[in-house]
Image: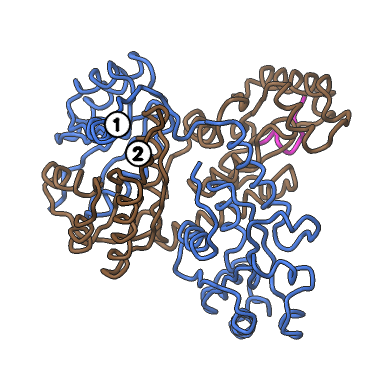
Chain colours: A brown, B blue
C-alpha cells in the first residue's frame, strides 16, 4: 500500500539552517518516511508569510494530508499569522523559550537571525581567516607560519585531510594545516623535519586500504598510486609511523567530516566555539 | 549586581552539532546571558552518561545554580539515566517525537547519529567531490570542465567568493566554481570568454569598498591593491558589469557565508538538499 504523500515545510525568517538540521535529526528517527520537502527561508514580512501560507494550503489540498510545518520565525505577529495555515505547526521558539525563560529568570527578546548571521564581526572574520589559513596550508604547501596552526593533520594522500581542515575552519574557526605523508617519510620512519617542532599539534588520519584504493581510482584510474597493494603499503606505513611516535590518530573510513572534526577537537582538547 | 554563573551542557550520543546550533539559536533570544558552556559529544554508553552526570552535579554544586542540559541522546535507557542529574534537562527527542509520531501515524525507532554521520555513502561522496571541485575551480584556476559547475561565483578579489563556494560544497554538495573579475574585464566591459557560455550559471558578489579596503589591507598593507580608491573603482566597475549583463548579484558586506549560500541557492533555484 502506497503511503499518501505529505509535504514538509521548513520556514524561517533567516537561513533556516538550524531548523533544517533539527528536522533532519528528528526525521532520522522514523523509517521509510517520504516527504516532499520545501525550505522557505528569509520570510520576514507579513506578505511573505501569507505567500507561504498559500503554498502550505495548496499542498494540503493536493496531498490530501495535513502538511507538517517546522518554523523558527521570531516575530510574534508573523508567528501567530503562520498558525492560520492548514498544517501541523512545530514552532521551536514556542517550544523552548517560555520554559527557558522561566528557568533562567529573564525574559526573552525578539532578535531575528543571530544564529547564522554575521554576528560579531571579529568572530566572523576569525572564521574566514581560518578558511584562508586552511587553504594556504593545504597539502603541505607551506612550512613558514605553521606555528600559527591550532592543529596539523597528517596522513596518506586522499585520506580526508583537506575537507576536515576546511570544516574545522569554517564552523569552528580552527586554524588547521595538513600534510601528506610520503614515501620519504616512510623510508626514514620520521616526520618531515619542519613538522617535528610541532609534534604536540600533529594528528593522524588513516583509512581502510580498499576504500583508499576506490577513492584514488576515481582520480587516477589504473595507476600504481591507486593500486590496492600501494594503498595497503602506505596505510600500514603511516599507521606504524603514528604508533611509533605516539601520534593520536583516527580512521576516516566510515566517519563523516563532521564526526572527524568533533572527535579530533575532543581528542586534542581544542576549545569548541561554534559560530 | 553580578549574575550568578550557570553551566550549560550540550549532550549528544554523536557529534552534538545540531543541538549546538539549536541552543545557539534559542539563547540568541536572551540578552546578556553568560553561561559556562560544555559540549559532551559521543556519550553512547552508561559509563559515559554517568561521567557526564558527575560533571553536571559538580557544576550544580560549584555554581550554586541549576545547570541547563540540552540532550539529543536517542537510546531510551541512557536518556532516562541522564534525568537523574541535578539539572533542568531539555531533551529534543522527548519534545518532538511523540507529537510527530502521532501526526504522521507511525512509530519512531531509536537510530543513533544519522544526522551528522556518513549516512548514504554515495551522498557523502558527493559532498567530498563538491569540496574538491570548489578547490580545483577556485579563483579562476581552471576553465576546462567548468560545464560541470552548478554555479559560478564572480566578483572582485577578496569579496567572499571562496568561503561561500566551499560552504555550498561542504553542506549542500553544490559544485561551485569562482572567478575573480580583473582589470581586463573592467576595461573590455565583458566577462572572460570562457565564462560567457555559462552565463546562466553566473552569480555576482559585491562588497562595500571600505570593508574591501580593510580586508585587503590585512593582506597587503599599504599596497595600491588595498587602497580605498582602487577598491572603490573595482567595486563600481564590477557592479556595472553585473547590471549591464543582467547577472544577479548580492552584497556580502554584512552577510555571513551561510546567508550568502542560502540566498544564492534561492535566487538561482538550485535544489537545497541538506546532508
| Residue shown at 75% from the left, 85% from the top | B187
For label 2, the crowd category at 10 Å Cα-Cα, with few meaning under 14, some 14 to 19 and many 20 or more, is many
Q: CA distance from mark 2 to mark 1?
A: 7 Å
On screen, residue B159 above or below A20: below
Q: Quadrant of residue A231?
A: top right
SS assignment at label 1? strand
Residue B218 shows up from this direction:
yes
Residue at numbered disc 2 = B19
| Residue shown at 51% from the left, 54% from the top | A127
Residue A195 lies within the magenta run: yes
Badge 2: chain ID:
B
Magenta region? A190-197
Towards the viewer: B213 or B269: B269
SS assignment at label 2? helix
Residue B117 place in picture, x, y as percent: 50, 31
Residue B33 lies within the magenta run: no
| Residue shown at 63% from the left, 60% from the top | B151
- Proximity of marks 2 and 1: CB atoms separated by less than 8 Å: yes
Q: Quadrant of residue A104?
A: top left
Q: Is A181 on the left or on the right of A85, as rendered? A: right
Badge 1: chain ID:
B
Residue at numbered disc 1 = B71
Residue A254 place in picture, x, y as percent: 58, 25
Residue B70 shows up from this direction:
no
Amino acid at each position: 500500500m502506497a503511503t499518501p504523500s505529505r509535504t514538509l515545510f521548513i520556514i524561517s525568517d533567516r537561513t533556516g539552517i538550524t531548523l533544517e538540521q533539527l528536522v533532519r535529526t528528528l526525521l532520522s528517527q522514523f523509517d521509510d518516511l517520504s516527504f516532499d520537502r520545501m525550505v522557505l527561508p528569509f520570510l520576514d514580512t507579513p506578505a511573505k508569510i501569507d505567500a507561504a501560507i498559500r503554498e502550505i494550503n495548496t499542498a494540503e489540498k493536493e496531498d490530501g494530508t495535513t502538511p507538517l510545518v517546522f518554523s523558527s520565525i521570531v516575530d510574534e505577529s508573523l508567528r501567530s499569522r503562520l498558525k492560520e495555515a492548514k498544517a501541523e505547526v512545530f514552532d521551536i521558539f514556542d517550544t523552548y523559550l517560555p520554559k527557558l525563560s522561566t528557568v533562567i529568570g529573564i525574559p526573552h527578546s525578539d532578535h531575528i537571525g543571530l544564529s547564522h548571521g554575521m554576528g560579531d564581526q571579529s568572530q566572523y572574520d576569525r572564521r574566514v581567516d581560518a578558511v584562508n589559513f586552511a587553504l594556504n596550508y593545504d597539502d603541505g604547501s607551506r612550512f613558514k607560519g605553521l606555528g600559527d596552526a591550532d592543529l596539523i593533520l597528517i596522513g596518506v594522500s586522499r585520506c580526508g585531510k583537506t575537507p576536515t581542515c576546511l570544516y574545522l575552519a569554517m564552523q569552528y574557526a580552527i586554524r588547521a594545516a595538513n600534510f601528506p605523508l610520503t614515501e620519504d617519510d616512510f623510508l626514514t620512519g620520521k616526520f618531515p623535519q619542519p613538522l617535528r617542532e610541532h609534534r604536540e599539534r600533529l594528528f593522524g588520519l588513516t583509512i581502510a586500504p580498499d576504500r583508499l584504493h576506490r577513492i584514488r581510482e576515481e582520480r587516477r584510474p589504473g595507476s600504481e598510486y591507486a593500486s590496492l597493494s600501494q594503498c595497503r603499503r602506505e596505510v600500514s606505513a603511516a599507521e606504524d609511523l603514528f604508533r611509533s611516535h605516539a601520534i593520536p590518530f583516527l580512521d576516516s573510513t566510515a566517519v563523516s567530516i563532521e564526526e572527524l572534526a568533533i572527535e579530533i577537537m575532543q581528542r586534542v582538547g581544542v576549545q569548541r566555539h561554534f559560530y
